[in-house]
Image (tube, coloured by chain):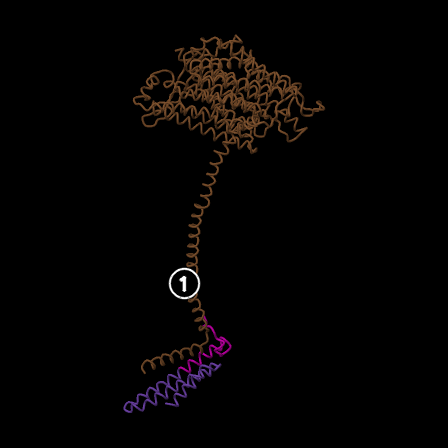
Amino acid sequence: MEQLQHHNFSILAALLAAGMPLLSFCWSALRGKQQKSGYTAIMAIAISMICSIYLFSRYWNKEELNEQVTWFRIGDHSFMAGILLNNLSVLMLVLISSIALLVHIYSTAYMKGDPGIHRYWMYLSLFCAAMLGLVMADNLLLMYMCWELVGFASYLLIGFWFTKESAVQANKKAFIINRIGDLGFLTGIALIYAQFGTLDIKPLFSNEPLWSVSEVVSGNWLGAGHQIPAVWLTVAGLAFFVGAIAKSAQFPLHTWLPDAMEGPTSVSSLIHAATMVAAGVFLLARVFPLFNETVLTIMAIIGSFTALMAATIALTQHDLKKILAFSTISQLGFMISAVGIGIPGIAMFHLVTHAIFKCLLFLAAGVVIHEMQHANQKSQPGSDPQDIRQMGGLKRYMPITTTVAIVGAMALSGLPLTSGYLSKDALLISAFEWADLRFGPTIIIPISLLISSVLTSFYIARLIIKVFFGKQRIYPGNPEKLDIREAFPAMLIPMIILGLAALFPFFSANPLVFEHSWLLEGFDRPETLERMNLYHTMVPAAVNLLGISVIYIAWRWYAENTYPLKTSGFLYRFSYFQWYIDRLQTDYLVRPVMLFSAACASFDRKVLDGFINVVKNAGLWLARLAAWVDQYIVDGLVNGIAGLAFWLGNVLRRSQNGRVQYYMLSMFIIVLMVWLFNFIVHA
Amino acid sequence: MVLSAALFSIGLYGVLSRRNAVLILAGIELMINAAILNLVAFGKFDKVHDAGQVFALFAIVLAAAAVAVALAIILQVYKYYKTINPEDIRQLKD
């Protein structure tokens, strides 16, 4: 009985966690412009966080909870909707709700005075509700619904400043690219349903009967009672992977994420760094048993390639937020390749640590942009407040922001004592071990990950040094006039909390050995973890040595102004223009589609509309003719008869003049005429 | 016959063109007399019964009565309209 009560209470808590932001969204939508303060949204997400923490304490590493109700029926098939609380979902619940709460608090100061702030809170609540629903959903269809909703909320928030043309373009781009991924996800769902007749995650993906019957036997994929060629297994895996590629901004669908930086920075930190983009990785971890060797290999290749590519692009960007966006893409590449290597647990670990430190970096960037905007308005109106070439020496104005940003950067580059060190080393070590167990060329993947991680150290050091250290670049002459201050407490407190969470004690008691992290305990650990100890010392050492040396180089180059490279070299431009991928996509995919659409439009306008116009004109002429006939012939006849009668009447009236003699004369004439007539007839 | 035709025509002209009701009445009398003259003239074909002369006598009596009535009407009209010019009496007009 007590057990049952606990059970019900947990369900209530889970529903509250996702339902409160939803309620807040509805309330804001109803209240419209009056909803400026955002306290409703903060309250809702705080309740969500409390519920999430309660659920986390109850279900982490314990028996999982799966509760369903029938959603709808089609014929004999009933679709269930429900919540599934296991390690994966409660971890994500806590992560999302707490980061969302911090970002909400940050936003009260960051978005203050924005004319559209009522929309901001509304969208943010919608996003939180959808995201929390996404991680709790126990059914792929429900998950897909939430998946679409987070995409939609992201679309709304990217285009939050919808009067800016670039923001409108960016949100359209994000939406369209995400549609490709959604299509993949939907294809995957359809294949799963065709094969197993159910979409519930628990029976499908947790080593229970449904999954165990679906072995690949002699080229055929056995389903529930029937079999299809094994290639469909690969196709299904790839379909889910495409969904993850688009949502998690992997090559070649990554181009929307840098553009998505048009949204408010607080939104970028929550959606485009910490939570929504991680949904792709989360999806892969959820359906992990589905993937076969081929799909996993493709995943590892694309992940590591994306990691490397995005890291090289981030080296040369000038826009503060773009650097962070490419860094996010690169780190997501790490996670995807971790899933591909077969260690979704470590991918989730990196997801959590990355969510924290990347959110922190974005919030710090938000402070910098906020203050630069103020300073620029006074000194150089019109210049870009996100350009790191304009910054420098900000350390003396905002010491606390600088400190937390450095903590975030250290975590990102994987220096010891931070959470990033733990997760990234776990990832790299596992990658090397994985490559060791396989044939030769696979070593490329861990090596490219290693290179990416070194590049990461470099670009983040470049960012920190250019922004906070070195010489002041605006108003170099008199620093007194520069109106840059430390951030407001509402912005500082979330950053400090995140900064503390980005340090090691939050994840592991031992700062140097990731295996002791409590987070990894929650997932299946690959057996290779304990075996080859050579890597366990070599990889962290290599990462740190290389990392520290590139940070030193960055310091020499940027802080002491001894930058040795020309900015016109091919490699520089290759990196600066983001490997030309965006341009290639524009030229070879978007433009043909646009041309085709233009052709269709002109066909529509010229041929179809022309035809319709001809028909219309013919009708018009016919109508005119009918009108003319009606007016002149039919009406003419009627009017003519009437006119004739009128005229005759008029003529005859003249005879009625009342003169007796006239009447007599006419009588006489008539008699005469009758007589004459008779005379003529008879003669 | 010719005399009677001439008399009829003169009477007709008188009726149609006079502006005095009394003279119109005279015209009517002329026409009646022309008709009576015609009756007398046609009486030549009926010597046995002399129907023409008899009818002529009747007609003369009737004409006298008619004249008496007509004169009475003209007197009344004159009393009513203060004129006996038929041009001025247009109550028959629609």
Relative to residue A676, is residue A389 depicted above or below?
A: above
Q: Which quadrant of the figure has residue A456? A: top right
Label 1 crowding class (10 Å Cα cut-off): few <14, some 14-19, many 20+? few
Along the line of sight, the residue nearer the viewer: A267 or A567: A567
Chain holding disc 1: A
Query: In the drawing, does residue A675 fall left or right of residue A540?
Result: left
Would you say the magenta stretch is mainly helix, strand or loop? Answer: helix
Query: In the drawing, does residue A302 fall left or right of residue A503?
Result: left
Give x and y (percent) for residue A325: 54, 24
At a point 48% along the width and 28% down the height, the residue shown is A152
Give x and y (percent) for residue A614: 43, 50
Residue A24 visible in this rendered orientation of the protein:
yes
Q: How many marks?
A: 1
Q: Which residues are magenta?
A: B66-94
Q: Based on the picture, tell me whether residue A22 belongs to the magenta stretch.
A: no
Give x and y (percent) for residue A475: 69, 25
- Say which residue label 1 marks: A637
Give x and y (percent) for residue A217: 32, 19
Along the line of sight, the residue nearer the viewer: B11 or A6: A6
Chain that is coloured brown in the picture: A
Along the line of sight, the residue nearer the viewer: A79 or A252: A252
- SS for dot 1: helix
Q: Give the residue type that dot 1 points to.
A: Leu
Along the line of sight, the residue nearer the viewer: A81 or A194: A194
Q: Colour of chain B?
A: purple
Relative to residue A167, is residue A11 depicted above or below?
A: above
